[in-house]
Image (cartoon, rainbow, N blue to C red):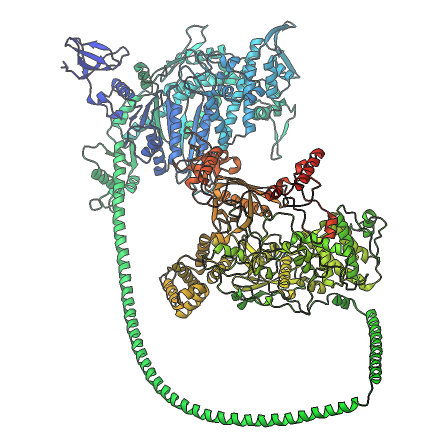
Amino acid sequence: MVVLRKGDYVWVDSSIGVPIGAKVRLSESGQLQLIDDEGKEHKIKKDASLKPMHPTSVNGVDDMIRLGDLNEAGLLRNLLIRHKEGIIYTYTGSILVAVNPYQLLPIYTPEQVQLYTDRRLGELPPHVFAIADSCFFNMRRNRKDQCCIISGESGAGKTESTKLILQFLAAVSGQRSWIEQQILEANPILEAFGNAKTVRNDNSSRFGKYIDIHFSKGGTIEGARIEQYLLEKSRVCRQAQEERNYHIFYYMLMGMPAEQKKILSLGSAVEYNYLFMGECTSCEGRDDIKEYAHFRSAMKILTFTENDSWEIHKLLAAILHLGNVNFEATVSNNLEGCDIPSSNNFNMASKLLEVDTKALDVSLTQRSFMTNREIVSKPLTSEQAVDGRDAFVKAIYGRLFIWIVEKINSAIYKPPSEDSNDIRRSIGLLDIFGFENFKHNSFEQLCINFANEQLQQFFVKHVFKLEQEEYSRENIVWTHIDYSDNQRTLDVLAIKSLNVLSLIDEESHFPKGTDTTLLNKLNQMHGKSNIYIPPKNSHDTMFGIQHFAGPVYYDSKGFLEKNRDALSLDVIQLVETSTNKLLKNVFHNELSVNEVKSRGNSKMIITPNNSLRQMTDSKKRVPTLSGQFRQSLDALMKTLTACQPYFIRCIKPNDFKKPMLFDRELCMRQLRYSGMMETIRIRKAGYPIRHTFQEFLDRYRVLLNSAVCDPKKESAKACSESICKNVFSAEDDWEIGKTKVFLKDFHDTMLELKRDKALNEKALVIQKVLRGYKHRKQFLKQRSAAVVVQKYWRGHKGRKLFRVVQLGFARLQATVRSRQIARQYELERRATLLLQTQIHGYLARKEWKRKRDAAILLQAHIRGLNARRAVDKMKRDAFLSLQERRAEELAALERQRKLEEVLQKKKEKEAAEQSEIITDQEMVDNIFGFLPSLVGGQEGQAPAGFEDLERKRTVLEEVDLDDAPMMEELPEEDYDDLDEYSFSKFASMYFQGAATPTHIRQRLRQPLLYHEDENDVLASLTVWWIILRFMGDLPEPKPQQAPRGRSAFADRSLQKDVASRQDRRLSHMVGLDQRVLRNRRSRKESSAQEEIPQNRKASTFTDLFSRSRKTSTMPEEVVLNRKTSSTPSETSKNRKPSTFTDLLTRNRKISTVPEEGMSNRKSARKPSVIQEEPEDDAEVAKPPTVQTISEEEEIMIAEGPTLDRPLTSLEKLHIIVGYAIVRRDLRDEIYCQICKQLQENGNRSSFFRGWVLLSLCLGIFPPTERFIKYLQSFIRLGPVGYAPYCAERLRRTVANGVRGEPPSWLELQATKNKKPMAISVTLMDGRTINVPVDSASTSKEVCQMLSQKMKLQDTFGFSLYVALYDKVWSLGSGHEHVMDAISQCEQEVKRKGGKEQHAPWRLYFRKEIFTPWHDCSQDSVSTDLIYRQVIRGLKYGEYQCEREEDVAELAAKHFFVQYGSDSSMENTESVVQDCVNSTLLESKSEAKWIQMVNTAHLQGPYINSKAKAAEVKAEVVDYARQKWPLFFSRFFEVVRHSGPSLPKNKFIVAINWTGITFLDERERKLLELSYPMVTGVNTMREGKSFGQSVCLLTLKGDFTLNAVMAADIVDVVALFLAGLTERSQYAVALQEINRQDDPTFLSFKKGELILLVKDDDFSPSGGWLKGQNERTGQKGAVPTDAILILPTLTKPTNEVLSLISLSPDQRKTIINNTLRGTATERVAPATLKEFSIEYFRPPTKDVNRQVISKNVAPERLWANSREPIRQPLLKRLLGNSELSHQACQAFTDILLLPDPSLF
């Protein structure tokens, strides 16, 4: 008898026949009583036999093999205890038992995945991840395919276990690729179409699936394939109570947008018969809307297109509508039939299926039969029609499900490689329907249970049969264990002849076969079997099968119909008529069979290979559903047999799906039929781990003690036994068989751990030996090297000491000898001086005496001659009278006059003869007679700061000017269609009055073309007069003092027209882009500033532009990008020289003010381009300009230039061209006048002069579109030498636009010879390249030509620079005309008194600006040019360093580039001369600089390293780019129109690679903006005369800036923003996204920094990017509309991130608070002048006033005036006559007010 104590555990009998555990405790009365595991109390009876509980069963164990109570009660209590503790997994050896918890447990996190990765089975508590890791590890170790069979009842958790294994394998494969995501996302789609809510399970899989995951040799997932088995199609039409249809229908109705549901005419689930049959439309714990969104996302990931998704929804909607179709019974011709009443559901179904309504009606209500001769139709009853409709619906859904599975496989399956070395392994996961036993079981349950019987037999065979057979074969001592074998059940169902499934198939093929005949055959064939349970009576349709899990009774009704699974011919024909592509696609097999049948009586079929075969008359049997299922199941079993299996047994704890509820009876039943008891017994007694001797020795060879057992001498069996004895203890249970080693599960884990430990120890020994050998070898090498170094060093020191001593003796000898020689020389010198003194005195006295005697003699003779002449004159005067002298004088004058007349006639006769025989070339030479024989250019003194380039100037390549092509070869004009564009035709259409298109020699009364502007009319007549004079058709007027009339007015008109060009001296300065030298203490005066030769005439065009300017109507504050005058002056001593001011001063347009006007001006510093704003109300003092000259001086005709005087050919040419440049409407007029004078011109001299004039004009300005065709037609008919030349000039001018300056002397010389020009461009390394140009060449073309010749790849930022004297400015690399700049230089030289044909201008090619992503390694040529530019800048002070050490460091790098590792003093001195500025050399001696540079060179890292010169150059360039970004900038003058307040309204915008900076005239930074702060930039046209405005949108406010170069600002900023955005890796979240449930998507908060990951997983064009949250470190997909990509290459500052996260109003508040109090200077108050620009009317054009007063200033409406006004000042009053009159009267009253001083 058992003695019980409090706290003991015993076994107590229970009602289910299995003992239950109970605990002994004291009752309230002090007696002992039992409390069982279910909480029930039991009294202890005296006769009760209580069995004590083994200690292992009290608290439970991880592996049930270790249970002491190895019985059903012990197993059941072990699972119960662990279930109560929330532990759902338990091992049975390597088999995992999983109990469904019906709740979410936190044991599937990524940390758990990491914990169970690469661990041995049994090391950690039981887990599904451990089984998955074991599959993965054994696949890679054994190189064998694995499979995991997950079995259990419906609702036991098989599907969830499958998903968990998939997630683990995807995580541990290590690739994290798109294919892994696709495999995981296949589950939501399959569950939506194949899972449904049943009574036992809310997510029951109504189909079976086998997922075969393919792995590469490295263990990464390459693909997968899914096989589906036996979808329960009947659920689409019928569901039991409290069950739902498939999830997809409810997903669609709840989650689809209302617009799409309206199109499909869908409502709620209760409206459809197919969805409300079970009276359950919702599922607790399942959100259909959220699941639908997940389903749509999964379809996109698995490459389902939007069209595919829409077509699937259409078929699903059609199924729902068909379910609502009703059938009304009818009787026709004594035959029962049915009709379909008209309904919206029926019409919508036919519309969605895209079939005819009538055809659908017929196919559902009639059935066609094929007879021998014809097709007979039979009406169907309403019940038959309902069955036919349901069959049609099931066929659609079933085939749609198969199509979806194939679509998924096409996305995730990758065919195996043909390479034999590429071996692919796989892991299969079998998730198939569990054993089912319902109240009503049909054909589907029979197939499902048959599949479970097969899997149970596979489990039994693997665990019991094969294992016990192998023990016997290997002579292992073994006690046979009885187990439950279901082989007899399989024999009855499918294996033996005339089995159940075969009888069902056979009966299905009989046309007259019914369910009753089937049941009779089953009773007849298997009625005596104890597996088959026959019906109770003849009327009963139920039969039973004794399954391994118990008997199941099946209703035979509907067996044959479900097994046939066939569609009627009417339905197939209906599908064939449908236009729905998806519907036809899913019925592809049926349609292809029907197509073959419909070919009639044809006996021949043509195969795809064009071969013929004879058709047999025998009908091929259509495969049944059970036959197909058996084939798929057989293939599955073959696959499982070829793999190493793992088993997971899922247990359902209760039927109510409640957590923490354990039904002992239900769980015991599942344990029994799963054979778990026998499994535990055989696993406990057996040896699951087996290795052959050789495999065991190969893997665990490291654990073998070779001293005990030598593998070379002993057999593999003996070695294996030695290893086991060495590793395992004597108590361990392991066996040695004939061919294998048999071990327990924990033995395998122990061996692996010890093997890893032994390998680590051996690896450490190998590393120790190799490292010792390596370091000993290195030590010996270093020691021998040290001995060699010591030997040479000691020798060097001895030789050095010897040289020092030798040098000392040599110096001593030299000193002694020099003193001796100096003493001797001094003595000889004194003697020589004494001798020279005596000789020089003697010779001087002798010479003086000789000269004195000669002078006395000369004086005597001259005095005598003068005396004799005086005496003769006195004698002659005494004889001649006064009348005689008068007559003599008259006669002499008459003779002189006659002689002059004869000479004059002779000259005129010779001139006339010469004019008749003059040639064409001589005529051209006469026209260009003012040109010298050789026109200069790029000669004379070099500009200041570039003398070194002039000294070492070397020509890189010479160009043959005759063969030189232009920069851009434009397509040739097609002249074939120009015949209809004759000049005469144009004249007849557009000429005014009676003007003819032929030559005349008289003045015009009106222009040839019509002009609206009166000034254009007057200018046209003036141009005609000048053209006649140029061509020689009118003589030149005689000089006169005061010419009046039209010519004087025309002259003044020209002056008025060109007044707006007054600031164009050295114009085209692109902002402040020029790069100039630093301040130099002394500047050499230019040679061109000498006095003007008195006998040289001034140029008319230059005079017009320099002396006769009118004041611009535009206020000076508005005239942007026009530089103020600058005069070279010394920097004030009281102020440090401004680097930026010097930059602006030396690159400014040359003033048009005479230099005398600047003499009285004194300034403490050089003037800035932007004048400083006044500190008070007073105006800024302005220098004297052209406008300040008194009108009395201007109106003096003798002082100003006029046209009514003799003009040279050059002056006439400049006047004609000047009118064309400033007046666009005159260009066609000028061309028409020239063409008119060339047509039918009989005077050869006039004719050729006209063609010369035409060719010159064609190089300056183009005609309009209206006249260009006519001009081309006229040119092609010109003289032989001029036609092609003029046509080419016209083509180039039209392509590149109008010029801004008259032709230069270089162009005139080229036009004279009709040859192209060549200019020399100097590079910063001293090379010079000759580039061919013409009159239309632009800076862009020149830069492109230079880049091609130098093979320059990184061309951005390189610009063409023009230098003259001490001024340098940039032409950029755009559309600026090069010859305009040269012409401006010539005009400037002439203004300063030099000769323009010898203007010393120079062209340079320099780096102007860097891109933010500049990379020196991309182009070595570009890096070398910039490097040379930086070195020159250091030398000439353009780039200055704050510390002398920086200069020495840069010089050391230049030392290495020039001379490598050589460190001689001569080379150091050369480097110092090349790099160190003269100012620095003066402040510190040259010797000290040489020492500093040499020391820096020797200590630099380049001498001993293998660095290349190109790398050092790149470092210097990067240093310059980082150090001096302002000097590599583009500058623009702007005026702030609106935006946040700044201390200045007029300032300079500097754009460089770091950002945008606002600077004032004193180079103070008003505002700095990095590119992440700039959110946008654009231009907008203003209504003012100064052009466009720039709208700069920033995080610190939106600025509107007025600028002439607005388009250039936008282009540069937009280019940098686009380039930075494309290369950026940083973005800011604009909104919050929380997708924690889906790891594919990245979750982040608003304002967080996102690091962009550039890879091929996502495409920005698709709206997605891959990013990493900086805060969390997580990665995932990011929608592009939820982030803002920052234009930066570095991490943005906190200021930028904080500003982006704020709203615009918050940013505005912060900016206002920041700017408050920062304005240190007073901003000039608004003036009436500024107000007038926007609100006053335009000044009136009084032509009479302009004629009377030459060069008078235009009307200044804002200034004081004593004249009444005729119009109001405000422009808004111009349209109101009444208010206009009152405003004018008010101004008159103000003028009439008396002087206040009188009161």
Where is residue 92? Give x, y as percent. 29, 26
The location of residue 655, given as percent across then percent down, is: 36, 15
Quick one: 1077 or 83, which is closer to the camera?
A: 1077
Relative to 602, residue 1629 above or below: below
The answer to whether residue 454 shows anywhere in this view is yes
Front-most of 680 and 953? 953
Q: Residue furthest front?
A: 1799
Nearest the viewer among 493 and 1004 is 1004
* 1103 is higher (above) or lower (below) than 1009: below
* Nearest the eye: 1291 or 1102: 1102
Left-right relation of 573 to 1447: right
**Residue 414 visible in the snapshot:** no
Query: Which x, y percent locates residue 1623?
Result: 49, 44
Image height of 726 relative to 263, above or below: below
Measured as percent of width and height from the top left, residue 1223 is found at 71, 51
Q: Quadrant of the N terminus?
A: top left
